[in-house]
Amino acid sequence: MISKDTKLILDISDLHASVEDQPILQGVNLRVHSGEIHALMGRNGCGKSTLAKILAGHPSYKVTSGQVLFCGQDLLAMEPEERARLGVFLGFQYPIEIPGVSNLEFLRVATNARRQCRGEEELDLFDFEDFVIDRLKIVQMDPAFLERSVNEGFSGGEKKRNEILQMALLEPIVSILDETDSGLDIDALRVVASGVKQLANPDNATLLITHYQRLLNEITPHFVHVMAAGRILRTGGPELALKLEQAGYDWLDDPSLDQEGE
Amino acid sequence: MSSQNPVQEVVSQPYKYGFITDIETEKIDKGINEDVIRLISSKKEEPKFLLEFRLRAYRQWLKMKEPDWAKFGYKSIDYQDIIYYAAPKKDQKKASLDEVDPKLLETFDKLGIPLSEQKRLSNVAVDAVFDSVSIATTYKEKLAESGVIFCSIGEAVNEYPDLVEKYLGTVVPSNDNFFAALNSAVFSDGSFVFIPKDVQCPMELSSYFRINSGDIGQFERTLIIAEERSSVSYLEGCTAPMFDTNTLHAAVVELVALDDSSIKYSTVQNWYSGNEEGIGGIYNFVTKRGHCRGDRSKISWSQVETGSAITWKYPSCVLQGQDSVGEFYSVALTNNLQKADTGTKMLHVGPRTRSTIVSKGISAGNSTNSYRGLVQMGPKAKGARNYSQCDSMLIGDQAAANTYPYIRSQQTEANIEHEASTCRISEDQLFYLQSRGVGQEEAVSMMVSGFCRDVFNQLPMEFAAEADKLLALKLEGSVG
């Protein structure tokens, strides 16, 4: 799957970060190439979601050292909106409700910001509506959700579909999906997973943050990383996730098993 | 990366109308007494009834006390330190726009209100008031063709004294309150609108008030009369230069609606609000009231209040005619140390009268934004209904929002509903929008205009977009 045309999209080296002076990330190293799907697993509090938020530029997290290159550019120097326009997408674990702002209008503004950055023409209301109706199919979403305020009163599953819809519209280069599977029933999980699979292509990359094998049953990752205490402890193929599923995270704490899977 | 308080940054924008026009002005001496009132009246060559109206008001004002219940806590105003009349020196008897000082035209151009023939806003007639006088009214002739009178109140006093005498002070009596009494004594200029029976005013009417001198008070007076089955939509806008002293603005607006008529009155108020430390800015004490005198008449107030150091303003409706309708749609935005105390009074007198109140307060910085309103159902208001909705949005954690609804009912068969809500623009909302490529300022203004949409929908089309932009501007670097 790694052809000679692959591009290094995300290059994280020795990343340290803290929130309210509490260190969370303690030297994360990760390289993601085009065409790859990575899964990032680990216990609660190991730093997975922190990593996702830092990549998207959340203001509450402070990078203390290390660097992140996105297609060769210094990602950490950019404002969150610049990152998004260049093609970094964060699917939120808990998508935020924004009362009063129409979902359709929001999606249009976001899509046009990204298009403008790519040197494409902005879509007017009509063209955008055609575009969005087409993309709705990917997540099997009811067009009625376009008329509502952003995420307001959406169920958990609807919020997650709305996230994947945004991903479908923005056509990001790297999608970081933070526990997109959590809180979904099995049907919604399939829809969301199928959306993610449809959107993955040789030019982009996906980083799935998850606790559970069940998402990885739907989407087979090329790499599985396990985080603990703010760094990536192990990296392997899909079998690593299966092993975790069987043995639990405690297995990570057992040094005698350290040689396995290498 | 983002700085400490992105929301606050987006809200604090420099005031772009703060320039001063360098023009020779005729001012009278500071202070107020009966001679000053006589002098103002004689400068305006007013008929006797008006001088008497002024003097009566002045004598009542002397006995009144400045209200302090809004607890603004400002340094008390020295009424002898204010100039009560200032006018650009050039000949005030303007026959046509060609005679208006080009500097004044330029000033209004800069404010986005072009008065010259070529650049005028199409389908909007404008009365431009500079300090104490009206300098130009556009489209007067065209309006006259349909019988509509639109001119400065100064002109109306001379040309239509009977109409003025008949209606002036009948909605807001000269002893109504401290500031209304002061206005009645010294009012300078303002607009006069008369829509005769069965006429739908063919264009939007608009007044633009500009304070230029630092030490004058502006006391404009507006009177709008809609006769039977007529209708009109009127908009006022206001700006002032930045001075580090406070300027007093005490206006009175009276609306009279007869049977089956309708008046829509919209305000976009952007007086200078003082700097970040709260130095300077306009004290805006305004009495606005509409009288639904006729059956099935309708008065609708919509306002976007963004300026002034202090705003004290309660556009109200007296719903006397049967089945008459009163509406109040308001957006009030405060930032830094601004204080706004605004709302409405809906006085239901007649049976089956209806009123709607939608108030949106947005407070940022260290400002205080209060809604204060009264809904009163009189003993004859059988079957009357009111619906009120008061929403507050807080930006940052230093701002305050208050709601003081007063409800009185003397009628068992009246229906009153009140809803209120408070929300805050959170960093998470802002981050969510940013993470989709929406810039910080645009994100804030999207949220604010979403919050205000119910009110913007009520503004005349030409100005809704303007109001939206104005809010975005005020919030740039802070909130919207």
Image (spheres, rainbow, N blue to C red):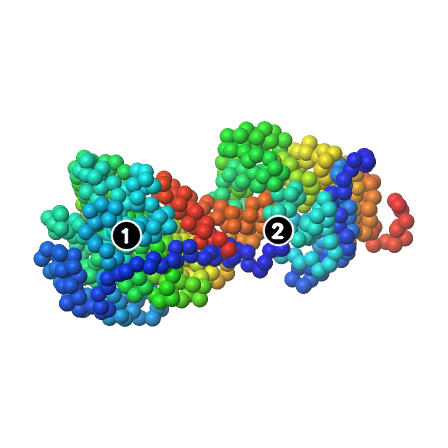
Classify B399 as above or below A145.
below
Residue B108: x percent and y percent? 33, 50
Residue B30: x percent and y percent? 24, 69
The residue that appears at 69% across and 57% down in the rendered structure is A63
The residue that appears at 30% across and 50% down in the rendered structure is B102
What is the chain identity of the residue bearing mark 2? A
Disc 1 target residue:
B101
What is the chain identity of the residue bearing mark 1? B
> What secondary structure is marked by label 2?
loop
Q: Which disc is residue A90 wearing? A: none
Q: Are marks 1 and 2 in contact (CB under 8 Å)?
A: no
Residue A77: x percent and y percent? 66, 53
Figure quadrant of the N terminus of chain B: bottom right
Residue B19, by quadrant, is bottom left
Residue B158: x percent and y percent? 13, 51
> What secondary structure is marked by label 1?
loop
Q: Which disc is residue A79 wearing? A: 2
Q: Amino acid at mark 2?
A: Glu
The residue that appears at 19% across and 39% down in the rendered structure is B144
Q: Is residue A160 left or right of residue A35?
A: left
Task: Judge whether residue B437 can be spotted in this image.
Answer: yes
Task: Tell me the distance, in whole angstroms, between the alpha carbons under discs 1 and 2.
Answer: 49 Å
Nearer to us in this view, B423 or A76: A76
View extreme (left): residue: B48
Circle 2 residues within 10 Å: few <14, some 14–19, many ≥20: many
Q: Nearer the viewer, mark 1 or mark 2?
A: 1
Task: Judge whether residue A156 can be spotted in this image.
Answer: no
Q: Is residue B166 left or right of residue B449?
A: left
What is the number of callouts on the image? Answer: 2
Classify A52 as above or below B212.
above
